[in-house]
Amino acid sequence: MKELWFDIDQRSSIPIYQQLVDKIKEAVARGILSTGEKLPSVRELAARIAINPNTIAKAYQELEREGVIETLRGRGTFVALWKSRVNEEAKRRVIREMTEKMLVEAFYLGLPREELLEIIEETVREWYRERGGD
């Protein structure tokens, strides 16, 4: 089992459980956590990162609901085999909503369209290069 460490911002407006959900999803997407890999128990992770066990349990429940992890009774919690349960229309809706949030932030930062597109293209290239994609 890997030693997981997550930077949780106690002062963030994002709830702690959601920060944890996001960090674990990112670790899976980046290949830091692999399919079938065992995660620490709720109590172990709570002790490691000094977070209330109920908060960890809530994050694990959300991750399980989303199909990112699975709990096998008596064996532990593992990274699930990824199989998207979301249809194409729903995928596009989620990404569009996230993109619109990013556009609002770019607006308030005064970021010109061309610079925003450049940042997005660069980030996408790096993301796929790190994963051995195109």
Image (cartoon, rainbow, N blue to C red):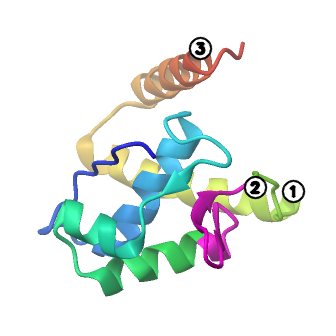
Residue 116 image-quadrant placement: top left
Mark 1: give few (<14), some (14-19) or many (20+) Cα within 10 Å.
Answer: few
**Where does residue 8 sit, x and y in percent of width and height?**
22, 59
Which amino acid lies under the numbered mark 3 shown in the image of this protein?
Answer: Arg
Mark 1 touching mark 2, by CB under 8 A?
yes
Q: Compared to 121, does 32 lie above or below? A: below
Q: In terms of sequence position, does the residue under pointer 2 or pointer 3 come before the other? A: 2
Q: Is residue 61 visible?
A: yes
**Where does residue 17 sit, x and y in percent of width and height?**
36, 74
Which numbered circle lies on residue 129? 3
Which amino acid lies under the numbered mark 2 shown in the image of this protein?
Answer: Arg
Q: Compared to 15, does 89 lie above or below? A: above
**Where does residue 134 sit, x and y in percent of width and height?**
72, 12
**Where does residue 92 sit, x and y in percent of width and height?**
75, 55
Q: Is residue 50 magenta?
A: no
- Distance from label 1 to label 3 (Cα)? 24 Å
Residue 10 relative to residue 105: left or right: left
- What are the residue bounds of the magenta stretch? 64-80
Residue bearing mark 1: 88
Q: Residue at 14% x, 68% y: name it.
A: 10
User: Which one is in front in this view, the residue at disc 2 or the one at disc 3?
Assistant: 3
Which numbered circle lies on residue 92? 2
Q: Residue at 65% x, 79% y: name it.
A: 73
> Which SS class for mark 3?
helix
User: Which one is in front in this view, the residue at disc 1 or the one at disc 3?
Assistant: 3
